[in-house]
Image: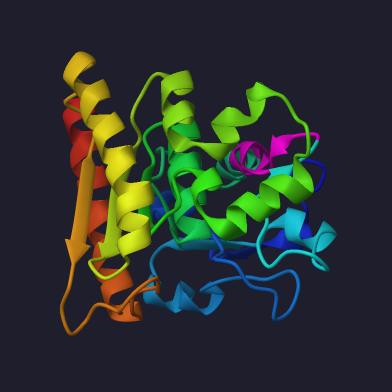
Amino acid sequence: MQDIFPSECIKVFRPHLAENGIVVSLPSIGKKYLPYFTRAMWHDLFPDKCYISCADPSLLKYKDTLNGAWFLDNEKGSWLKNLAAWLSLFIKSNVKNKKPSIIFAGSSMGGYASIYLANLVEGSFAFAECPQTNLYNYPGSNLAIEHILHDIDSRAEEHLNLICLFNKQKRIPNVHIFTPATDVHHFGNHVAPYVRAVGNYLKKQSNNAVYFKVTVEHSSQVPVGHAPISKTLFKEHIEHLFFESSKQTDSTTN
């Protein structure tokens, strides 16, 4: 599977438990070391599940100019399509009896990637913390567009705007977006426009199987501004999405 997605950008914990469920952790920006994995050590929060932590292959190429690359690639458009293909092969190799529940999770850049992948992998769920939904509307991702895509044509829009992606896929992914109330930029420029577009789509194409939730929260447990949540809250929300996934599976099999 190395030719689909670089093996050095994937860490897999407990592949033998994939049938119990899979958490795929996507990276936020950073390059303290490369490949840069976010929350890889949080795998111990889910001892009964398979946990996969991913790094962004594009950052390896643009490490001298970018802190984050949003998985963008001048030839592929996005490495995330390759990651979805890699995951499909991984499941075929490690799951024999039943289709596993899959939760994509990440903060900021990882939140964008989580929603993107949930669009590609049918039946999966995304937990997206303060995500970018339009890469033109965030300074870091806009810089990545300039460095990586250059003059690529409008076919790239699905990689840059998650509204364009779900319109192309013709379905809304199962998503829980979580944003601190004090992250004003992401709420106004990313979350709110995405929610409006989803609402308009669902009004025309109602689908009762879709799980769509937005939490804008302010409390002593929630960080201030554009910051990731604690391990405790992360575990709580991921476990809830596994529960929702099981309910959705039961409703389609009965």
181 left or right of 123 in image: left
Residue 151 located within the stretch drawn in magenta: no
Tell me what residue is drawn at x 65 percent, y 62 percent. Answer: 68
208 left or right of 189 in image: left
Classify 250 as above or below 175.
above
Q: Give the range drawn in magenta.
A: 75-85
Could you tell me residue 166's position as x and y percent? 42, 27
> Can residue 51 be seen?
yes
Residue 83 located within the stretch drawn in magenta: yes
Classify 241 as above or below 181.
above
Could you tell me residue 25's position as x and y percent? 50, 61
Classify 234 as above or below 221.
above
Q: Quadrant of residue 186?
A: bottom left
Tell me what residue is drawn at x 56 percent, y 71 percent. Answer: 38
- Residue lying farthest bottom? 220
State the residue in front, 97 or 246: 246
